[in-house]
Amino acid sequence: MLFFDAANPAPNPRRVRIFLAEKGLKVPTELLSIMAGDHKKPEFLAVNPLGQIPALKLDDGEVITESIAICRFFEALNPDPPMFGKGPKGVAEVDMWTRRVELRLGTPLSMVWQHSHPFTARVVVPQYKDFGESNRPKVNDALRVFDSALGDRPWLAGKDYSIADIALLCTVDFATFIGMPVPDDMPNLTAWHARASARPSAAA
Ligand SMILES: N[C@@H](CCC(=O)N[C@@H](CS)C(=O)NCC(=O)O)C(=O)O
């Protein structure tokens, strides 16, 4: 198999790298440059016509895209330690928090990035600046949901580190990169971020 990766600050391929590190897995990797536009070149569009990274090409030629789907694939092959929850309730809780990270936080953050950040002005045409800016409060509202939940547990879905935490870590670090760090009045989220960042996998 071949994993198509891109360097930080790209948050989605990093999810897969952290997941693999938590599992102790090594996968043959091709590093693409988003800055050089490798993900829009014909060679890569032949792998993923969506032109997005990450992608995983399997030995039979099939391609899996979407970072969470790629992680699910590795989870099914390597169930220990479980990163998608244990038992019906545990699995549902991990899924619930992962979806909240992607939908409540990731969506408005992506709108800020695409519509109000100078880095994306070249590729997002037209940028709707007012719309981008209007998403900033939604990002902080979502961060507050996580801060509140983390008041009574070490990790988003309970006592075990999971894919939900990986998704949140990559999103929070990307938010910081684009100028939206965790606000000072969110101590639980700040402490969680320090715990997650101290795991060796966070260096991935
Ligand atoms: N939902 C996808 C998102 C993938 C994605 O947006 N990747 C970014 C890099 S972090 C990308 O390739 N952006 C270029 C583009 O969308 O054109 C996933 O989780 O894998």
Image (cartoon, rainbow, N blue to C red):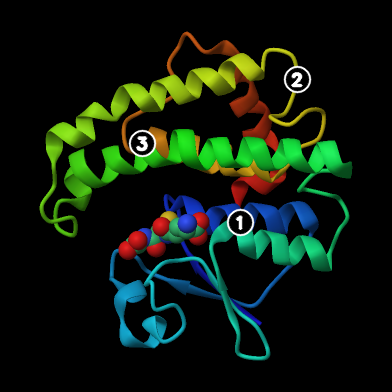
Q: Which mark is residue 23?
A: none
* Residue 59 appears left or right of 102: right
Q: CA distance from mark 3 to mark 1?
A: 19 Å
Q: Secondary structure at mark 2?
A: loop
Q: Secondary structure at mark 1?
A: helix
Residue beneath disc 3: 108
Eye-nearest disc, 2 or 3: 3
Determine the residue positioned at 50% across, 17% down: 144
Q: What type is the residue that disc 3 sits on?
A: Pro
Q: What type is the residue that disc 1 sits on?
A: Ile
Determine the residue positioned at 62% across, 62% down: 69
Residue beneath disc 1: 68
Q: What type is the residue that disc 2 sits on?
A: Arg
N-term-proximal mark, 2 vs 3: 3
Q: CA distance from mark 2 to mark 3?
A: 26 Å
Place of residue 170 in the rendered image (x, y in percent of width and height, measured from the top left): 52, 43
* Residue 62 appears left or right of 85: left
Q: CA distance from mark 2 to mark 1?
A: 23 Å
Q: Is residue 20 above or below residue 5?
A: above
